[in-house]
Each structure stands twice: as structure tokens, then as C-alpha cells.
Amino acid sequence: MPTLASRGEPLASAREQLGTLHRLPLATGFETELEGAKLWPLRPTRLEILQLNVGKLCNQTCRHCHVDAGPDRREVMSRETMELCLSALERADIPTVDITGGAPELNPNFRWLVEQCRARDRHVIDRCNLTVLETGAHRDLPEFLADNRVELVCSLPHYRKLGTDRQRGSGVYDKSISALRRLNALGYGDGKSGLRLVLVTNPVGALLPQCQASLEAEWKRELERQHGVQFDALYGLTNMPISRFLEWLRDSGNLEEYMARLAAAFNPAAAAGVMCRNTLSVGWDGTLFDCDFNQMLELPVAEATSRHIRNFDPERLRERDIVVDRHCFGCTAGAGSSCGGSLA
């Protein structure tokens, strides 16, 4: 599937995406719900995660991708911007660096960045699509990641082949299983080596995720039975009404019903724990956002003097109001959804 950008699709524009969401007749507003939960304005807690989106280049073009990533995208974080991120790390007590994309491993400075973060004694998470580990130039990445004690959070739509290939493309499932077996052989996912392997699933369709705990038990049983694959935990994420998933919702006639379902399922307990409260997102060009979703909708942090990593000011950022919009219902519906899985 070509990216929205390469097709000249109007939804490639963040403004068009926001306009599409705002034209829907929702029964309530996100700010209204936050007010009812006594969470308005939404404010940060302790900054625990610096999430670096190192680019939109990817070896896949998944149907649900909120980044509109793909092989034709050329936006990647430069070494200079990474150095600014490392400088920010040294000025703040942020224990975790969460590296995402696109396929972050395709950034030519990915390995250097991982080594620099580890040299500063930061916990590093790599959000991996698994199939990139099966490409020629990256076949040795599992060993590199293990040597650097990197936590892997790997997306896999379903433990069955049909659901995965339908969302990600033909052949993706078999490559993903091959990559998981190689990771297992290094100790990832065995629960003893300290090499943490997390799988991430999201519904195939306009549905909310099922109970994360029951899904995890089912996935562990089936992947072990079918392929001998082990992993430590499963995160169930809600598909966000952004970019290519927004396009699918629109074209399939599911958009209005899906947004109404998200809004009706607003959960105050999930809202209290949303990831934008303890995470700061850095775009490929160094712009700062409250989360990766706001990044794709070009909604930077409200603190105007700290909108680029070169001006990183943890004190000012701590006092900011978090920017929210209708897409935020995706993080607060039901059990909630974040880069760390369900919230409540």
C-alpha cells in the first residue's frame, strides 16, 4: 500500500485529519470529559520517558499506521538532532529512552544512538516491527540489541497469519515468526535473561482491544504451541483515528460510529494515567510534542519557548498544559491505551 503522502491523499495533511474529526457530530467533547474527571487542564507528572521518533522511513506500509510511514518517506532524525536529545538527557533525570519510527532501525544513526543512551545508563526501548530484523543489512541487529540490553517492544497484529498479513501485507507473519525465534535464541522473552520482549497487538477493524490480561494468556499459549515462541508481555493498543487508520475508517463507513464508541467509553481512571503525562515526544526534526499522536497531527507542546529540543527546559515543560483534541478519546476509552499498553 503506498503512503498517503505518495498518493497525494488529502488526509496526508494534519489539518485535514483534524478537520475530518471535528466535522463529526460527537455527543461530548474531550475537554468536557476531562473537566468531569477533574483532570482539566491536563498536566504532566514526573517526566520518565523521552520518546524519540527518529523518522518516518519504514520497510512496511501497514494499513493502520498513524505515522503514514513507508519506504518512500525520507524524514529521518539527523545525528545533530540526536546529539541535542542526548544533551537534554544529561540535563534531566529521565530514566528511559523510547525509540520509535517508522522503523527506527533504518535510521543510519540508530546503533550510535542506542550506544550513546546506554553509555549514559538509560534504559532503552526499541519499537520494532520484527520484519526489519529479517532484512539483509540488519540481520545482525538482534545480537546488537541483546549486547546493549535493549528492551524490545514488537508489533504483531495477531498470532494468526491471516489477521497479521491482512493488516501488514503478505509474508509479514512468516518473517515476524522467524525474527521472534532468533530473538528467543538470544534469550529474549525467556523471563530469566533480563532481555525483555514485549509484543504489541491492535484490533483488526473498528473495535476496542479486548482485555489485555486474557489476550496475553491466549497469545502465550498459541505462539508457544504453534511456533515455540516465547515473550514476556503483551500490550493491547487502541487504533488511533489518525492517518492511514483514519482513511480506512472513512472509506469503510466506520468513522462516525468508531469515534462515538471511543467517546462513549471514556474512562476517568484511564485518563488519569495517559502517557502524555510522563512522556515527552521528540519529532524527527527536534520539535517537541506531548505524544507521538500529537506529533503526527502537528500539535506541538503548548510551552512556546520550549518547542524544540535545543531549547529543552524541564522546569518550564513541567508547568505546561498538555494539548488535547478529539483523537485523545483513543487513549482513554475502556481500559485505556498507551505505548505501555492498557491503563486501567
Image (cartoon, rainbow, N blue to C red):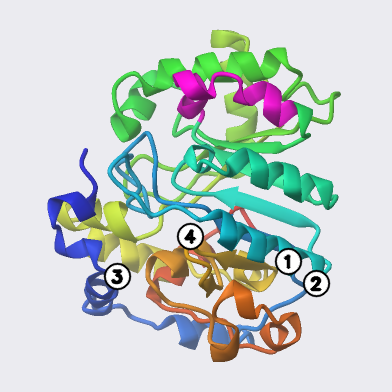
Q: Within 10 angstroms of label 2, few (less than 14), some, or many (20 or more) residues?
A: few
Q: Residue furthest front?
A: 80
Q: Residue at x 55, y 19 (%)?
A: 139
Alpha-carbon span between mark 3 and mark 2: 32 Å
Image point (45%, 67%), residue name? 295
Q: Quadrant of residue 264?
A: bottom left
Which residue is identified by label 4?
A: 284
Label 1, label 2: how far apart the Cα atoms are: 7 Å
Q: Position of residue 48 (x, y in %)?
A: 76, 64
Question: Which numbered disc covers residue 304?
Answer: none
Upstream in the sequence, badge 1 or badge 4?
1
Q: Nearer the viewer, residue 27 or 58?
A: 58
Instruction: Please give the label number shown on residue 91.
Output: 2
CB atoms of marks 3 and 2 within 8 Å: no
Let me know if residue 338 appears in the view: no
Sequence-earlier tag: 4 or 3: 3
Q: Amino acid at mark 1?
A: Ser
Mark 1 in CB contact with mark 2 (< 8 angstroms): yes
Dominant SS type (magenta): helix
- Front tag of 3 and 2: 2
Dot 3 crowding, Cα within 10 Å, few <14, some 14–19, many 20+? some
**Residue at disc 3, secondary structure:** helix
Q: Earlier in the sequence, mark 2 or mark 4?
A: 2
Q: Is residue 319 above or below residue 310?
A: below
Residue designated by label 3: 14
State yes or no: residue 179 in magenta. no
Q: Which residues are magenta?
A: 130-146
Residue 268 x, y percent position in the rendering: 60, 73
